[in-house]
Image (spheres, helix red, strand yellow):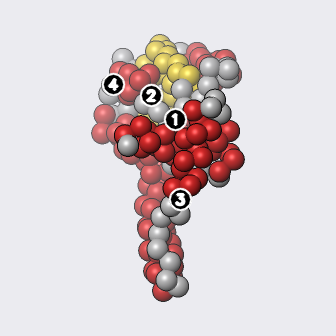
Protein backbone atom coordinates (compact mmCIF):
# COMPACT_ATOMS: atom_id res chain seq x y z
CA UNK A 1 0.00 0.00 0.00
CA UNK A 2 1.34 3.41 -0.95
CA UNK A 3 2.18 5.76 1.92
CA UNK A 4 3.59 9.24 2.21
CA UNK A 5 6.90 9.35 4.05
CA UNK A 6 7.17 12.98 5.12
CA UNK A 7 10.39 14.59 6.24
CA UNK A 8 10.71 18.11 7.65
CA UNK A 9 13.84 19.74 9.08
CA UNK A 10 14.91 23.04 10.57
CA UNK A 11 18.46 23.90 11.57
CA UNK A 12 17.94 25.06 15.15
CA UNK A 13 15.60 24.51 18.09
CA UNK A 14 14.47 28.14 17.77
CA UNK A 15 13.03 27.54 14.30
CA UNK A 16 9.56 26.16 13.69
CA UNK A 17 8.59 23.07 11.67
CA UNK A 18 4.89 24.02 11.38
CA UNK A 19 4.91 25.42 7.82
CA UNK A 20 6.69 22.35 6.42
CA UNK A 21 4.59 19.91 8.43
CA UNK A 22 1.28 21.53 7.42
CA UNK A 23 2.25 21.49 3.72
CA UNK A 24 3.22 17.80 3.84
CA UNK A 25 0.06 16.89 5.77
CA UNK A 26 -2.05 18.74 3.15
CA UNK A 27 -0.26 16.89 0.35
CA UNK A 28 -0.99 13.52 1.99
CA UNK A 29 -4.63 14.50 2.60
CA UNK A 30 -5.06 15.66 -1.03
CA UNK A 31 -3.68 12.31 -2.22
CA UNK A 32 -5.80 10.47 0.36
CA UNK A 33 -2.76 8.51 1.57
CA UNK A 34 -1.46 7.51 5.00
CA UNK A 35 1.27 9.82 6.28
CA UNK A 36 4.30 8.73 8.30
CA UNK A 37 6.06 11.92 9.40
CA UNK A 38 9.67 12.43 10.49
CA UNK A 39 10.60 15.75 12.10
CA UNK A 40 14.09 16.99 12.85
CA UNK A 41 15.64 20.08 14.44
CA UNK A 42 19.29 19.78 13.46
CA UNK A 43 21.79 21.37 11.08
CA UNK A 44 22.24 19.62 7.75
CA UNK A 45 25.96 19.50 8.49
CA UNK A 46 25.37 17.11 11.39
CA UNK A 47 24.22 13.52 11.53
CA UNK A 48 20.47 13.47 10.86
CA UNK A 49 18.96 10.47 12.67
CA UNK A 50 15.36 11.22 11.63
CA UNK A 51 16.38 11.46 7.97
CA UNK A 52 18.06 8.07 8.31
CA UNK A 53 14.90 6.68 9.89
CA UNK A 54 12.73 8.16 7.13
CA UNK A 55 14.99 6.72 4.41
CA UNK A 56 14.97 3.33 6.13
CA UNK A 57 11.15 3.39 6.44
CA UNK A 58 10.59 4.30 2.78
CA UNK A 59 9.57 1.18 0.86
CA UNK A 60 8.53 0.28 -2.69
CA UNK A 61 5.57 2.36 -3.93
CA UNK A 62 5.90 4.92 -1.10
CA UNK A 63 6.25 8.64 -1.89
CA UNK A 64 9.00 10.51 -0.01
CA UNK A 65 7.75 14.08 0.47
CA UNK A 66 9.64 17.17 1.63
CA UNK A 67 8.65 20.82 1.67
CA UNK A 68 11.77 22.18 -0.06
CA UNK A 69 14.93 20.65 -1.55
CA UNK A 70 17.29 22.48 0.81
CA UNK A 71 15.63 20.70 3.75
CA UNK A 72 16.96 17.40 2.39
CA UNK A 73 20.37 18.01 0.82
CA UNK A 74 23.23 20.53 0.88
CA UNK A 75 24.33 20.05 -2.71
CA UNK A 76 23.09 18.85 -6.06
CA UNK A 77 25.38 15.85 -5.76
CA UNK A 78 23.93 14.86 -2.37
CA UNK A 79 20.39 15.37 -3.69
CA UNK A 80 21.15 13.17 -6.68
CA UNK A 81 22.54 10.43 -4.41
CA UNK A 82 19.37 10.48 -2.31
CA UNK A 83 17.05 10.47 -5.31
CA UNK A 84 19.12 7.63 -6.77
CA UNK A 85 18.48 5.71 -3.54
CA UNK A 86 14.74 6.35 -3.94
CA UNK A 87 14.89 5.04 -7.48
CA UNK A 88 16.63 1.84 -6.32
CA UNK A 89 14.00 1.30 -3.62
CA UNK A 90 11.09 2.03 -5.97
CA UNK A 91 10.14 5.15 -3.98
CA UNK A 92 8.81 8.28 -5.69
CA UNK A 93 10.07 11.71 -4.59
CA UNK A 94 8.21 15.01 -4.19
CA UNK A 95 9.43 18.45 -3.14
CA UNK A 96 6.28 20.52 -2.67
CA UNK A 97 7.72 24.04 -2.83
CA UNK A 98 10.06 23.27 -5.75
CA UNK A 99 7.39 21.52 -7.85
CA UNK A 100 9.67 18.49 -8.14
CA UNK A 101 7.57 15.33 -8.46
CA UNK A 102 8.86 12.02 -9.85
CA UNK A 103 5.32 10.63 -9.83
CA UNK A 104 4.75 12.61 -13.07
CA UNK A 105 6.44 12.29 -16.49
CA UNK A 106 7.69 15.89 -16.22
CA UNK A 107 9.15 15.18 -12.79
CA UNK A 108 10.94 12.09 -14.08
CA UNK A 109 12.42 14.19 -16.91
CA UNK A 110 13.52 16.86 -14.44
CA UNK A 111 15.16 14.15 -12.33
CA UNK A 112 17.17 13.05 -15.38
CA UNK A 113 18.25 16.64 -15.99
CA UNK A 114 19.18 16.99 -12.32
CA UNK A 115 21.49 14.00 -12.65
CA UNK A 116 23.18 15.55 -15.69
CA UNK A 117 23.62 18.90 -13.93
CA UNK A 118 25.00 17.23 -10.79
CA UNK A 119 27.67 15.50 -12.85
CA UNK A 120 28.37 18.71 -14.77
CA UNK A 121 28.69 20.70 -11.53
CA UNK A 122 31.13 18.15 -10.09
CA UNK A 123 33.28 18.23 -13.26
CA UNK A 124 33.36 22.05 -13.37
CA UNK A 125 34.40 22.27 -9.70
CA UNK A 126 37.20 19.76 -10.27
CA UNK A 127 38.44 21.64 -13.35
CA UNK A 128 38.39 25.01 -11.57
CA UNK A 129 40.19 23.61 -8.55
CA UNK A 130 42.92 22.06 -10.70
CA UNK A 131 43.33 25.25 -12.76
CA UNK A 132 43.46 27.43 -9.63
CA UNK A 133 46.06 25.23 -7.93
CA UNK A 134 48.18 25.13 -11.08
CA UNK A 135 48.04 28.92 -11.48
CA UNK A 136 49.00 29.37 -7.81
CA UNK A 137 51.94 26.97 -8.18
CA UNK A 138 53.19 28.95 -11.20
CA UNK A 139 53.11 32.10 -9.03
CA UNK A 140 55.11 30.27 -6.36
CA UNK A 141 52.18 29.91 -3.97
CA UNK A 142 51.42 26.81 -1.97
CA UNK A 143 47.88 25.78 -1.04
CA UNK A 144 46.50 25.71 2.46
CA UNK A 145 45.89 28.22 5.18
CA UNK A 146 48.71 30.39 6.48
CA UNK A 147 50.34 29.08 9.63
CA UNK A 148 49.92 30.84 12.95
CA UNK A 149 53.12 32.01 14.58
CA UNK A 150 54.14 30.84 18.04
CA UNK A 151 53.71 34.29 19.61
CA UNK A 152 50.06 34.40 18.52
CA UNK A 153 49.50 30.86 19.78
CA UNK A 154 50.90 31.79 23.21
CA UNK A 155 48.63 34.87 23.35
CA UNK A 156 45.56 32.80 22.42
CA UNK A 157 46.32 30.27 25.17
CA UNK A 158 47.01 33.01 27.75
CA UNK A 159 43.80 34.91 26.90
CA UNK A 160 41.72 31.72 26.90
CA UNK A 161 43.05 30.77 30.34
CA UNK A 162 42.20 34.27 31.59
CA UNK A 163 38.56 33.77 30.61
CA UNK A 164 38.24 35.00 27.01
CA UNK A 165 35.82 32.91 24.97
CA UNK A 166 36.96 30.87 21.99
CA UNK A 167 34.48 32.77 19.80
CA UNK A 168 35.94 36.16 20.78
CA UNK A 169 39.51 34.93 20.28
CA UNK A 170 38.62 33.52 16.87
CA UNK A 171 37.18 36.89 15.81
CA UNK A 172 40.11 38.83 17.26
CA UNK A 173 42.76 36.78 15.43
CA UNK A 174 40.81 35.98 12.26
CA UNK A 175 40.84 32.24 12.82
CA UNK A 176 38.16 29.61 13.36
CA UNK A 177 36.94 28.50 16.79
CA UNK A 178 38.15 24.99 15.99
CA UNK A 179 41.63 26.46 15.45
CA UNK A 180 41.47 28.16 18.84
CA UNK A 181 40.65 24.84 20.50
CA UNK A 182 43.38 23.10 18.51
CA UNK A 183 45.94 25.65 19.74
CA UNK A 184 44.74 25.20 23.34
CA UNK A 185 44.88 21.39 23.09
CA UNK A 186 48.37 21.54 21.58
CA UNK A 187 49.48 23.72 24.50
CA UNK A 188 48.13 21.17 26.98
CA UNK A 189 50.22 18.48 25.32
CA UNK A 190 53.50 20.37 25.74
Question: Residue 180: x and y, percent?
Answer: 54, 43
In front: 144, or 63? 144
Res. 16 image quadrant: top right
Query: Sequence order check: which comes first, mark 4 or mark 3?
Result: 4
Question: Residue 18: x and y, percent?
Answer: 67, 17
Q: Would you place residue 36 above or below residue 81 in this image?
A: above
Crowd rating for badge 4 (residues with CA inside 10 Å; few <14, some 14–19, many 20+): few
Question: Residue 184: x and y, percent?
Answer: 48, 40
- Single out the mark in the foreground, 1 or 4: 1
Q: Are marks 1 and 3 in contact (CB under 8 Å)?
A: no
Q: Which residue is mark 2?
A: 48
Tell me how far mark 4 sits from mark 3, CA to CA.
48 Å
- Secondary structure, mark 1, is loop
Q: Which residue is mark 3?
A: 149
Q: Are marks 2 and 1 in contact (CB under 8 Å)?
A: yes
Quadrant housing the C terminus: top left
Tell me how far mark 3 sits from mark 2, CA to CA.
38 Å
Q: Is 13 on the left or on the right of 84, as rendered?
A: right
Query: Sequence order check: which comes first, mark 2 or mark 4?
Result: 2
Looking at the image, which residue is at 30% across and 39% down?
Answer: 88
Amino acid sequence: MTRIIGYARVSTDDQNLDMQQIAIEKYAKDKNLELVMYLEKISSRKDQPELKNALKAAAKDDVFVIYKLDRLARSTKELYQLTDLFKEKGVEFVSINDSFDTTTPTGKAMFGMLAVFAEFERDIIQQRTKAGLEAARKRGKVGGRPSIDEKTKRLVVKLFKSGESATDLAKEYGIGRATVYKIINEAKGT
